[in-house]
Amino acid sequence: MRHRHVWRLHRLGGHFPAGSPQGRKSIHKIQHVGRRRGMKALVWEAPREMRIREQDVPRPGPGETLIKVDYAGICGSELSGYLGHNALRVPPLVMGHEFAGTVAEVGSKISDSEPALSTGDAVTVNPLYCTGESELQARGLDQLCPTRQLVGAHVPGAYAEFVTVPTRTVHPLPAGMSTRVGALTEPVGCGVRIGELAGNVRDATCLIVGMGPIGLLALQVLLRSGAKDVVVADLDAERLAMGERYGGIPIDPAESDPVEEVLSRTDGIGAVASVDAVGTGHTRTQCVAGTMTTGTVILSGLHEETSEIPAADIIRREITLRGSFSYSPANFREALVLLDREEISLEPWIVEAPLADGGKWFDRLIDAPGDVSKVLLVPESQ
């Protein structure tokens, strides 16, 4: 697997297990939380407006845990929220749902199913959780539950020094994994979900349109699942080069037709599975056109909430059209395993930036992302 040596270096960043000298140092710092009343948080206040504000340090109630945030990633869904295009997010709001850190304080236990946590433990959090029981939750599809809540949307998120979350959503990191790596668990879970929905791709050709973080992760998952070829398309040359380094066959849609590339590689049959990681009418149509009869098209991009789609072609060729929304709890757990095994990553294009520069990086990712696979915001206390 390429970049393995780079990934290993980054496992040495962030916080360490509580028993190590580094871990004991972290615990010493965290023990001062009880004396702190204020913290800095990055608050989204209006479209394209984010500012650092002083807020009270939240206190965990029963069944809650206070996390000292080490790293919080910027998600594509938050970019649309930052622009004011996402009804889920209403200002003023502290966003941030891709994160990892260390346990600062644990509230009283309310369920035997809660993980055993200690101050100083390195953890990540599944930010999607249900507040009530449902048939979908019983099926392990918490992300589709009508009572689902998202940290950083329904409740304050991790663009802050501290955040409280339900204890049952906290996942201790495997021994030796840094919180820098652990912060990637949530987006990796999205890639795992796409791979699950794609089905059997062994020895087959696939197509992915869009080489943002989710496209890059889906690429790695499909290749790991045995795909023979994965054609990847993106108008951004630097992002396309990232996809090529991970094993994709790069096609610039401004110069060549990715659908024609797929058809030429499959004797006119098409891809067994196509993934639209952009979300426009044009990219959705491309994925349908590039998919084989009885194949699967997976829609994960949400750039446009509505668009035209070639329904007649889908019907006449019995193409399966699937939405892919986030990840299931099982997908999240698998993502953590893949990261621990160093079988998936977004290195070496991850950028760390001070939390105070968050607004600048939101603008950069919207206007000209370039060769950046993920931005991890770091609170000043790090």
Image: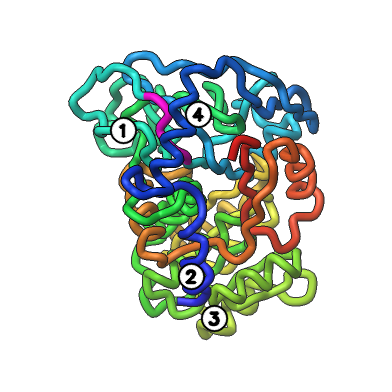
Cα distance, mark 2 to mark 3?
Answer: 9 Å
Please say whether residue 182 is one of the residues in the magenta stretch.
no
Residue underneath mark 4: 151
Q: Earlier in the sequence, mark 2 or mark 4?
A: 4
Element class at badge 2: strand
Q: Which is closer to the viewer, label 2 or label 4?
A: 4
Q: Amino acid at mark 4?
A: Val
**Residue 288 visible in the displayed image:** no
Task: Locate the C terminus by quadrant.
Answer: top right
Residue underneath mark 2: 292
Q: Main secondary structure of the magenta part?
A: strand
Cα distance, mark 1 to mark 4?
Answer: 22 Å
Q: Front-most of 120 and 217?
A: 120
Q: Which range is magenta?
A: 101-105
Cα distance, mark 3 to mark 4?
Answer: 45 Å
Q: Amino acid at mark 2?
A: Met
Residue underneath mark 3: 268
Residue underneath mark 1: 118
